[in-house]
Image (cartoon, grey):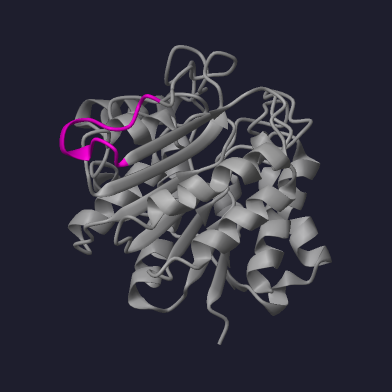
Amino acid sequence: MKRNFVYLGPELARYGFGASHPFGTDRMARFEQDFEKRNLRRHWRLMPPASTTVDKLSLFHSTDYIERLQRKSIGGEGFLDEGDTPAFPGILEASLTVAGTVLDASDRLMSGECQRAFIPIAGLHHARRDGAAGFCAINDCGIAIEHLKHHHGLRHIAYVDIDAHHGDGVFYAFEDDPGVIFVDFHEDGRYLYPGTGAASESGKGAAKNCKLNVPLPPEADDALFAKLWPAAERFLHQFEVEFCILQAGADSIGEDPITHLNLSPQTHAMVATALAKLSCERLLILGGGGYNRDNLARTWNTMLQALSD
């Protein structure tokens, strides 16, 4: 039986902001075209998206923000934040599908039904507990972490993020939580939104030195990443990781329209295969960003191909 799962379906693709927006609803279709061209169905079992209920959002988000999201979803006008994340009719339902699919994959990984799962439209890592940010109406990463902690009783969850943007919504939500082992390679915040993730930000209180931020200079390439990555592996191996989440944003690949890094898909493949070898053997991969459609298709499928091999 195939123990690699990939979630695909029109319900999941509905999370997006129109064809002219960097985070458009066409992103998943472009990934799926390349997935089929490479015949990756041989190695990855296709799973349908799942939805969840509004109360599951409260695992991470405040009641006030959930009520705001519900109101904005009805009219579909304006923004959920100060101007980065547009509302649209049904954004609540689209967000519930992202969250529900991530929770479904998490539960299947915990049950042993699969060892690796990939969700292309997920990894909305900027949303805060009390608000939206950076194209992210919810934070499915944070919801999954809280679910794994409280429903499954996990004590050490690794969150690794190689999106070009710092995963600030995850970092600050768990900055003082020693049970969330955080590793984030991102473009230096002096040059890119959200402007956070300095190397000096290593956690607070009991979580001091449980977080590793690695800011990269503009035009950073595979060679620099490969030089820095072994320290991240050593960092992760200090902890008894029970579950690993990889936010595999493809906006760190060269020629992305809104970022300035110059990685290739091989870096994502290298990171994914390294994390698949962690002793926990549970790897949940979330697509994250990526606004050059060819880049995201090549990057995510190169990563899945490497895990297939």
Location of the N terminus by quadrant is: bottom right
Q: Is residue 226 left or right of residue 196?
A: right
- The count of marks equals 0
Q: Quadrant of residue 223?
A: top right
* Dominant secondary structure of the residues highlighted in magenta in the image: loop
Classify residue 158 as left or right of residue 208: right
Q: Residue at x 46, y 75 (%)?
A: 114
Q: Nearer the viewer, residue 119 or 94?
A: 119
Tell me residue 275's x, y (percent).
Answer: 50, 60
Residue 130 locus on image (x, y percent): 28, 25
Magenta span includes 205: yes
Above-or-below relation of 277 to 264: below
| Image position of 2 (left or right of 252) | left
Residue at point 27%, 56% (across, down) = 156
> Is residue 100 at all visible to an observer of this figure?
no
Give yes or no for residue 28 being in the magenta stretch. Answer: no
Determine the image quadrant of residue 183: top left
| Image point (70%, 74%), residue name | 41
* Chain part drawn in magenta: 200-210
* Quadrant, the C terminus: bottom right
In this rendered view, identify the residue nearer to me: 293 or 192.
Answer: 192
Q: Position of residue 12 (x, y in %)?
A: 55, 51
Q: Is residue 76 visible?
A: yes
Residue 25 against residue 168 in the figure, above or below: below
**Residue drawn at (32%, 54%), measured in percent from left and top?**
157
Task: Name the residue nearer the viewer: 200 or 308.
Answer: 200
Q: Which residue extends farthest right?
A: 37
> Image height check: is 272 above or below 72?
below
Q: Is residue 40 above or below residue 201?
A: below
Percent x, y of residue 8:
60, 60
